[in-house]
Image: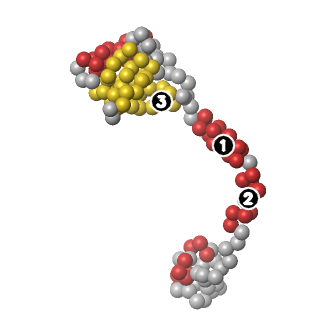
Amino acid sequence: MKVINPDMPEPYKYESDYRKIPREYLKSRIPQGRHMVKWAPFKTMPEQYERIEQYMLDQNKIERPILSDDQLNNLNEQLIDKMFNNPYIELRYFEDGYINEMSGYVHKVDALESELHLSVNNEIIKFSLLDIVEIK
């Protein structure tokens, strides 16, 4: 086998791939090249990157879950139980194509507006009762 790097320690004498050689054994005066100058023309349309990123985010979105009457009754019973017995609640809700989780204390249930008012860190957050998917 031919010695490629005669000045290096034994394990690296026959190595042809510089990426496998530790940096301290490589010459420090190796030219760096053009770096990102080569890719600069592709950065002229930032809208393209924004649109591609939005497409990637939209792929993960889901439709609003449709709950059966039994599931709705079960959620209603759990909510009533939480209101009167243990006001701390963990819920999963649908928002803008995603299922999110939130936990806090039940402040109020507004039946007219069909909203749940949740107290989280001394701040009141309103949720539509139609968006709630699960109560723990």
Mark sitting earlier along the chain (3/1): 1
Mark sitting earlier along the chain (2/3): 2
Residue type at mark 2 is Ala
Residue type at mark 3 is Ile
Mark sitting earlier along the chain (1/2): 2
Q: Residue at x 44, y 26 (%)?
A: 93
Q: Is residue 3 left or right of residue 94?
A: right
Label 2's element? Answer: helix
Task: State the residue position of label 2.
Answer: 40
Residue type at mark 1 is Glu
Q: Residue at x 39, y 11 (%)?
A: 111
Q: Is residue 75 left or right of residue 82?
A: right
> Dot 1: within a 10 Å radius of its alpha carbon, few (fewer than 14), some, or many (20 or more) residues?
few
Q: Nearer the viewer, mark 2 or mark 3?
A: 2
Mark 1–mark 2 contact, CB under 8 Å? no
Q: Is residue 14 visible?
A: no
Q: Quadrant of the C terminus?
A: top left
Q: Is residue 103 left or right of residue 52?
A: left
Q: Residue at x 50, y 17 (%)?
A: 66
Q: Residue at x 71, y 43 (%)?
A: 47
Task: State the residue position of label 3.
Answer: 99
Q: Is residue 8 above or below residue 21?
A: below
The answer to which quarter of the image holds residue 62 is top right
Residue 79, position as x, y percentages in the image: 33, 18
Task: State the residue position of label 1.
Answer: 50
Label 2 – label 3 distance at C-alpha: 38 Å
> Dot 3: within a 10 Å radius of its alpha carbon, few (fewer than 14), some, or many (20 or more) residues?
some
